[in-house]
Image (cartoon, rainbow, N blue to C red):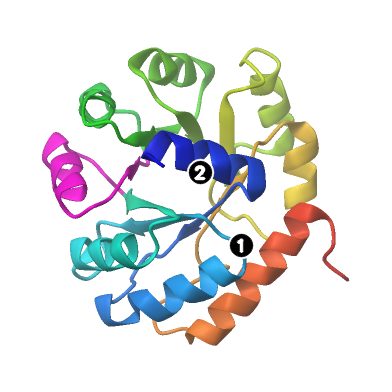
Amino acid sequence: MNGQQKFSAAMDALPLVAILRGLQPREAADVGAALVDAGFRIIEVPLNSPQPLNSIAALAQRFPQALVGAGTVLTVKDVADVKAAGGELVVAPNFNPAVVAEAVRLGMVCLPGVLTASEAFAALEAGAAGLKLFPAEMIPPAAVKALRAVIAPEVALLPVGGIATDNMAQYRAAGASGFGIGSALYTPGRPHQEVGEAALRFAQAWTGTLLA
């Protein structure tokens, strides 16, 4: 499968993005296995992590069934570097038309960060595969509902920032397609067994099987 196919399959199965900010390359295999075992298929290593391209390369090689790439992608050069490392995903905190265009040119999945309807429509026009609603603390469920009223239902809306198992249901009811999950899932040095347990809780929260 190519990146777009992996993105579509993941959105159908478990539309949660694991954001591994601060991941060390030596942790990549164990943390990645814990996530994949819990059902995660989208893995993002922000570029302000230690040696992020090494981690991306290790994850992409070890878990070909997953869509692996980078977050905090801010420049066109960043996009090329991620592609060279084997990444198929570009996530950004902002909408930069040049970054989206380069990702599209290279056949990568691009999820730019947007906050307003104007940014959302501009990003989609530029070729974004979906939209990262960031920071979600500034986009409560009511705002997601308002955006969803004007954005086509097939467009992926992924709130990121402050997402926890206890607020996913409200966002989902408002029209969120999935979520990006950061520090509630992974923090630097967290044992991979604990990451796996947290990943399973988030997967259960999505499917509605998480016990209180």
Q: Which residues are magenta?
A: 72-93
Disc marking residue 148: none
Three-letter amino acid code at disc 1? Gly
* Foreground of the two, 57 or 110: 57
Q: Position of residue 105 (x, y in %)?
A: 22, 25
Quadrant in which the N terminus appears: top left
| Residue at 38 percent of width and 40 percent of height | 3
Whether residue 82 is in magenta: the answer is yes
Disc marking residue 39: 1
- Image position of 101 with respect to 107: above or below: above
| Residue at 50 percent of width and 61 percent of height | 182
- Image position of 146 with respect to 107: above or below: above
Q: Is residue 1 left or right of residue 54?
A: right
Q: Position of residue 27 (x, y in %)?
A: 34, 80
Three-letter amino acid code at disc 2? Pro
Disc marking residue 135: 2
Q: Can you name the residue that lies furthest to the front here?
A: 1
Q: CA distance from mark 1 to mark 2?
A: 25 Å
Q: Position of residue 210 (x, y in %)?
A: 82, 66
Give SS at disc 2: loop
Q: Is residue 84 left or right of residue 93?
A: left
